[in-house]
Structures are given as C-alpha cells and as structure tokens.
Image (tube, helix red, strand yellow):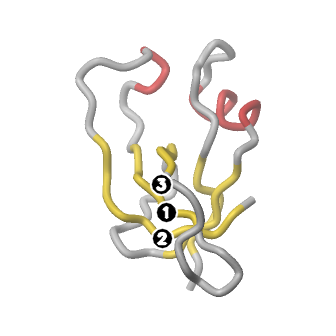
Amino acid sequence: MLLGIVEGTAVSHVKHPSMTGWRMLVVQPLDMAGGPDGDPLLVVDPLGAGHGCTVLISNDGRGARELVGDNSSPVRWQTIGIVD
C-alpha cells in the first residue's frame, strides 16, 4: 500500500474489456516526507476520489481483478481509501 496524490483521470477508447465502465486515475505516489516518489500510476477508482485528493492505493493485483470481475484483467492498482 502507498499514499498518493490524484493528478487527474485517464480516458481510453481502446482498453481491456474488463476496464470498461471503471474510472481510472493518474496517481503520484508519495514518499515519507510527502514528496513525489517514482512515476505516476494508473489506478482503478471505485471510491470517487477527486483531483488533488490524497488516496491510499494497493497493488494487490488479485484484489483489483476481483474488483473488476475478470481474472484475466491486466489491472493491478486500485484506490482503497481517501485520506481526510
């Protein structure tokens, strides 16, 4: 699990069928000091996080595939919490 900041959303007209209908966020992971840590990630968002929100994200690929309902889905990251 990582903390990250939502930088925006991603829109794709060509995607794996399992991702149809899911909101995808671009999330910048944060280091312990709150600065950027690595490259932004593409994250499935079942929670409705907005731009600029701090979110808790998980790289549990199995959990993400269960979320989208397709064991062959390439999805890996998902939001699991919005930090107040």
Tally of numbered tags: 3
Residue 5 at what x, y percent from top left?
48, 70
Question: Is 42 drawn above or below residue 40 in the view shown?
Answer: above
Question: Is 14 drawn above or below residue 6 in the view shown?
Answer: above
From the image, tell me which residue sits under label 2: 5
From the image, tell me which residue sits under label 1: 28
- Give amino acid for label 1: Gln
Earlier along the polypeptide chain: callout 3 or callout 2? 2
Residue 23 at what x, y percent from top left?
38, 44
Question: Is 22 drawn above or below residue 50 in the view shown?
Answer: above
- Looking at the image, which is closer to me, 73 or 40? 40
Instruction: Determine whether label 2 and label 1 are within 8 Å by CB.
Output: yes
- Give amino acid for label 3: Pro
Instruction: Determine whether label 1 and label 3 are within 8 Å by CB.
Output: yes
From the image, tell me which residue sits under label 3: 40
Earlier along the polypeptide chain: callout 2 or callout 1? 2
